[in-house]
Image: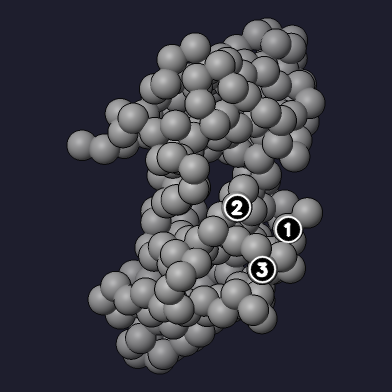
Amino acid sequence: KQEVTQIPAALSVPEGENLVLNCSFTDSAIYNLQWFRQDPGKGLTSLLLIQSSQREQTSGRLNASLDKSSGRSTLYIAASQPGDSATYLCAVINQFYFGTGTSLTVIP
Amino acid sequence: EAQVTQNPRYLITVTGKKLTVTCSQNMNHEYMSWYRQDPGLGLRQIYYSMNVEVTDKGDVPEGYKVSRKEKRNFPLILESPSPNQTSLYFCASSLFAGVLEELFFGEGSRLTVL
């Protein structure tokens, strides 16, 4: 069974910093990988979808990379803002297996 | 607007009183699924459906039922709810066509079983 791990579980950074969130998975036979954002008590909002044939995707200040051979994906957030504070989850898609998320706090 | 709609959003009930959480999507998606989210445990899949009349158990199906009679609807049924089913529930859907793609989530249904 696929296992998805996100490290760190929590991260606190000052506003303006660039940061990297990590997602690792045990089975490299995935279709795609998707990053989500979840605000407390709310649903999941899709941030980026990386298809298995791609190595990265960008949206605004966000950049996600995928290395299937090493079982890793990273989400890079540039120039962090307090509004980026949320929990970030990755999901690997053959079935949908989720990591437990990284809780990000950006301090003004 | 493309969306996944869950109802009710909040529900407090008592042990043993049957309830149904509805889920509907307007994107003609083949794949639909239910998750529960609990602190420290993350998102765990309850049931999923690849298409109409096709449903399969996820990781935590005990105490739940589902049905997929129409493509757009995928209700979650708790025949006899218990307090350990108190959780935040999410319905999600994805276009299948042989390869699972982007997953779209509903807003969530917070269930409390007393």
Crowd class of label 1 (few under 14; some 14 to 19; many from 20; radius 10 Å): some
Which mark, by number, is residue A50? none
Q: Earlier in the sequence, mark 1 or mark 3?
A: 1
Q: CA distance from mark 1 to mark 3?
A: 9 Å
Residues B21 and A4: in front is: A4
Q: Secondary structure at mark 2?
A: loop
Furthest toward the left, the residue is: B1
Q: Are marks 1 and 2 in contact (CB under 8 Å)?
A: yes
Q: Are marks 2 and 3 in contact (CB under 8 Å)?
A: no
Q: Is residue A41 above or below residue A51?
A: above
Q: Quadrant of the N terminus of chain A?
A: bottom right
Kindly identify which residue carries mark 2.
Answer: A94
Which mark, by number, is residue A28? 3
Residue depicted at 44% across the width and 32% down the height: B30
**Residue B87 appears in the figure:** no
Q: CA distance from mark 2 to mark 3?
A: 10 Å
Percent position of residue A2, x then y: 73, 58
Residue depicted at 39% across the width and 65% down the height: A48
Q: Is B61 left or right of B88, judged from the image as shown?
A: right
Which mark, by number, is residue A2? 1
Crowd class of label 2 (few under 14; some 14 to 19; many from 20; radius 10 Å): some
Q: Earlier in the sequence, mark 1 or mark 2?
A: 1
